Amino acid sequence: MININLAEILPQSSDSMKESVAETKSLAKQLLSELKALSASLNTDHIIHIGFAKAFDNELNRLIKTKRFTVTSSKTGEEFRLRPEHEIILFRLCQEVLNNVIQYAQANVITAALTYSDGLFKLEIADDGVGFDVEKAILERAKKESTGLLNMQKRARLIDAEVDIKSVPGLGTNVIITVPVTY
């Protein structure tokens, strides 16, 4: 619809208006693409179909496209699939970590490392943001009923995973999620 309306304006427009219309069409196309990617990231069937590793890569690519962060990622070991319900929970944990980076960290750089080994899957997400006092944040957020960090721990327990959050004010944050592999 937007493209049709803009196409009707275009023939009767000045050069500067044509440029604005072209830019608006481009932005609309980009927005639609981002909405599709966001929708896919919320769809558990899609995540199960493509697997955790690909879904996580897609999340990192969404961050790269914002041009707000420098994002690097690595994989070590032979990639394998976890049980579908574990992949969903792990993916939601990662979304929570990345959302915290976006909202609070004031970071420029995000680094992610996936490690596949016998009996263990490990994911590490680090940022160069402002960091925080982990214990203090958990206590303060518990009082305010802001439960992001606590929910991460609860989700991790559902799949027998451990979440280790290390952060130092002024030095960024490092989150390590370790999942025992049971088939």
Image: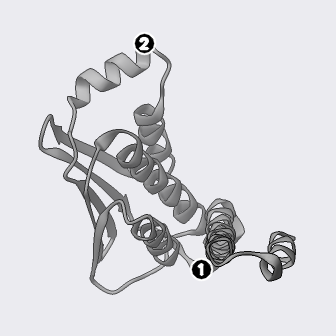
State the image coordinates of residue 39 (x, y, percent, origin top left).
68, 63
Tell me whether the residue at label 2 lies in contact with that at label 1, contact meaning CB atoms closer than 8 angstroms. no
The disc at residue 42 is none
Left or right of 141? Residue 47 is right
Check the image and tell me how it is coloured. Answer: one colour
Residue at the (36%, 60%) spot, across then down: 68
Left or right of 25? Residue 68 is left
Kindly identify which residue carries mark 1: 50
- Classify mark 2: residues with Cα within 10 Å, few (<14), some (14-19) or many (20+): few
Q: What residue type is labelled 2?
A: Lys
Q: Which of 118 and 97 is in front in this view?
A: 97
Tell which residue pokes out farthest to the front in this image.
Answer: 14
Q: What residue type is labelled 1?
A: Ile
State the image coordinates of residue 98 (x, y, percent, origin top left).
41, 53
Residue at the (46%, 47%) spot, across then down: 96
State the image coordinates of residue 87 (x, y, percent, origin top left).
53, 65
Residue at the (60%, 61%) spot, across then down: 85
Q: Is residue 124 above or below residue 28?
A: above
Which type of secondary structure does the marked residue at label 1 adopt? helix
Asked where in the image residue 30 lies, by quadrant, the reply is bottom right
Residue at the (48%, 54%) spot, across then down: 95
Kindly identify which residue carries mark 2: 143
Which type of secondary structure does the marked residue at label 2 adopt? helix
State the image coordinates of residue 57 (x, y, percent, origin top left).
44, 74
